[in-house]
Image (tube, rainbow, N blue to C red):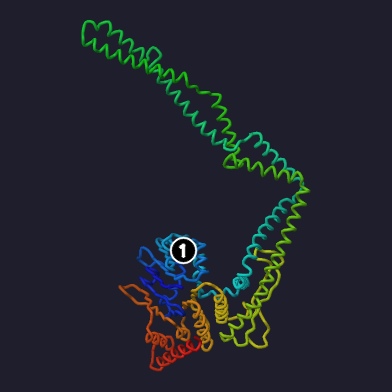
């Protein structure tokens, strides 16, 4: 269950922390106090998009942190599939928003928003203010049924989706193959040209990498030889080389060195330099003589690399991919060369795939229709608890003219809310208040067989009042026996059933509007019920009515305990 919520710098909220309880948690307050911000912050933490106006004016960042207690083995198993490991039975989810970008973390480990939504689906179910409007779409009806029947239908639907994908691939291949003869002749000619171009190159896997390394060595080798030859030209050969000039200088000194000891010393030093230079020149000459740059070999490597790069630019990023492309073209050429046989085999494959698809569609549809009877019965009973006294509810099936990845069923909820009236499509006859109750009934049924512990309802009471509101409150209280319910409401009948009642209030602090949330004590809860009953002026009579409503709610809960 959702243990706590911490919000900072979000819209009207400066900083608030809420500790939720098990059972029915009610959030109430004046219109505009920030109730929906609380629910919105939970959705934000769980990966929803970030509205630009959500970060509080003047704040550098916003933060939402949720702490969940996870003890159910099925939920823990789901979380483990996402790499989430509850520590001390806790999962901490946070989202920090800076400059319109959100950083999501689960137990301090970063997660993408898309993964957060998958994790959230295992922990919590949020019913938004207008979600009941989705019942106007027939597509939603089939989704609800499949969710209800997921244990029986899940693996079948996966197989159906994969078979449909293979079937569509074969159908598209057949459509592509069933072209006129002139197109085939042109394709054959082009494939033959491409294959000849690749085969003529006599490729070897990894050859391009070897040649590039060798080419690099040759390029550097050429530069080295050019540098060595230039250096040798300066030191060891030619009329103006260092060796020639040094020898000339040495001969001049030798001719006069006997007359002066200092000149004799200079002669000795220059003779030593001459010996060193001669040794250096011999080493240079040996290197140049022993190292050859084969222009012809370099040219062949360069030419071969040009060919390989040309083929890679047309058929793949490396030689292996070019060879794979050649294999695929060869297979395609064989198909076209034996076109009649290929086409006949392809038609057989399409026929076999369609038969398998038809079989899976029938199996899925059979499960759906069987479970639809049970779902309709459960929804009918739940609707009676919500003041639909003479309701009839069922699901009608039609078969679509084409296959889809979801089968061929076109299903729709049908309802009659008055005696003697025929069943009509739900989306055409139900009012807003009726849709809210129907969605509550469906959520109740789905929750009863689901591992999700926390359900959030944002103003599920839309369009209802009086006795209907009372019955909705009892249904919410019943649902709270096995699930944690967090509900925003404007109805005192629902608020009276709260196991924990929270008030959201708006005030002005330091010339800035701020929303706060706090848990109400028993007497404070009665006062809030009185406000919801009486509006601006709370009289003693209204206060007494609120006390009676709270007492009646307590008695009802005790009777159904």
User: In the figure, residue 298 lies in which quadrant?
Assistant: top right
Q: Residue at x 47, y 18 (%)?
A: 289
Q: Position of residue 354 (x, y in %)?
A: 72, 60
Q: Position of residue 252 (x, y in %)?
A: 29, 8
Residue 445 relative to residue 194: left or right: left
Residue 556 visible to an observer of this rendering: yes
Q: Nearer the viewer, residue 274 or 420?
A: 274
Asked if 513 appears above or below 236 in the picture, the reply is below
User: In the figure, residue 105 lies in which quadrant?
Assistant: bottom left
Q: Position of residue 380 (x, y in %)?
A: 61, 82
Question: Looking at the image, how many numbered discs can be counted on the residues?
Answer: 1
Residue 252 relative to residue 364: left or right: left
Residue 117 visible to an observer of this rendering: no
Circle 1 SS class: loop
Asked if 126 appears above or below 251 in the picture, the reply is below
Q: Residue at x 56, y 29 (%)?
A: 301
Q: Position of residue 17 (x, y in %)?
A: 37, 73
Q: Residue at x 50, y 22 (%)?
A: 292
Asked if 355 appears above or below 479 in the picture, the reply is above
User: In the figure, residue 172 lies in which quadrant?
Assistant: bottom right
Q: Nearer the viewer, residue 73 or 259?
A: 73
Residue that badge 1 annotates: 85
- Crowd around label 1: few <14 · some 14–19 · many ≥20 (10 Å): some
Q: Seen from this angle, which residue lies furthest bottom?
A: 541
Residue 445 relative to residue 269: left or right: right
């Amino acid at each position: 269950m959702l243990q706590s919520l911490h919000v900072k710098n979000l819209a009207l909220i400066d900083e608030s922390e809420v500790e939720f309880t098990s059972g029915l948690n009610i959030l109430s307050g004046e219109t505009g106090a920030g109730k929906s911000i609380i629910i919105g912050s939970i959705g934000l933490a769980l990966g929803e998009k970030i509205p630009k106006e959500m970060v509080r004016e003047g704040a550098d960042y916003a933060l939402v942190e949720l702490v969940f207690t996870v003890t159910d083995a099925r939920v823990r198993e789901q979380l483990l599939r996402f790499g989430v490991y509850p520590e001390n039975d806790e999962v901490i989810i946070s989202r920090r928003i800076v400059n319109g970008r959100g950083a999501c973390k689960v137990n301090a480990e970063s997660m993408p928003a898309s993964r957060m939504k998958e994790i959230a689906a295992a922990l919590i179910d949020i019913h938004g203010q207008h979600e009941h409007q989705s019942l106007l779409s027939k597509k939603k009806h089939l989704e609800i049924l499949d969710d209800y029947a997921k244990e029986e239908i899940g693996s079948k639907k996966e197989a159906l989706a994969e078979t449909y994908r293979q079937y569509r691939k074969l159908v598209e291949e057949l459509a592509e193959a069933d072209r006129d003869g002139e197109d085939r002749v042109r394709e054959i000619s082009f494939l033959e040209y491409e294959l000849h171009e690749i085969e003529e190159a006599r490729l070897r896997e990894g050859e391009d990498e070897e040649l590039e390394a060798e080419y690099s060595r040759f390029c550097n080798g050429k530069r080295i030889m050019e540098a060595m030859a230039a250096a040798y030209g300066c030191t060891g050969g030619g009329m103006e080389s260092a060796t020639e000039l040094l020898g000339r200088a040495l001969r001049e000194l030798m001719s006069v060195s006997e007359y002066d000891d200092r000149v004799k010393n200079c002669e000795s030093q220059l003779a030593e330099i001459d010996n060193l230079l001669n040794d250096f020149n011999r080493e240079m000459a040996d290197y140049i003589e022993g190292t050859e740059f084969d222009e012809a070999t370099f040219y062949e490597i360069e030419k071969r690399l040009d060919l390989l790069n040309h083929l890679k630019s047309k058929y793949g990023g490396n030689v292996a991919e070019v060879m794979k492309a050649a294999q695929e073209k060869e297979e395609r050429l064989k198909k076209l060369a034996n076109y009649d046989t290929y086409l006949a085999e392809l038609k057989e494959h399409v026929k076999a795939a369609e038969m398998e698809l038809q079989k899976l569609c029938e199996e899925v549809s059979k499960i759906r229709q069987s479970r639809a009877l049970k779902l309709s019965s459960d929804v009918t009973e739940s609707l009676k608890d919500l003041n639909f006294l003479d309701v009839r509810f069922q699901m009608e099936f039609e078969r679509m003219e084409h296959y889809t990845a979801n089968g061929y069923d076109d299903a729709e909820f049908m309802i009659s809310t008055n005696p003697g009236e025929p069943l009509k499509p739900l989306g055409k006859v139900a009012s807003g208040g009726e849709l809210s109750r129907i969605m509550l009934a469906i959520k109740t049924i789905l929750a009863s067989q689901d591992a999700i512990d926390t359900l959030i309802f944002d103003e599920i009471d839309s369009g209802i009042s009086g006795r209907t509101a009372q019955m909705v409150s009892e249904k919410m209280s019943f649902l709270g026996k096995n699930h944690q319910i967090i509900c925003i409401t404007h109805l005192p009948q629902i608020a009276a059933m709260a196991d924990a009642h929270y008030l959201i209030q708006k005030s002005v602090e330091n010339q800035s509007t701020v929303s706060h949330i706090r848990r109400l004590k028993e007497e404070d809860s009665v006062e809030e019920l009185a406000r919801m009953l009486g509006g601006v002026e709370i009289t003693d009579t209204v206060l007494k009515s609120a006390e009676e409503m709270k007492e009646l709610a307590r008695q009802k809960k005790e009777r159904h305990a």
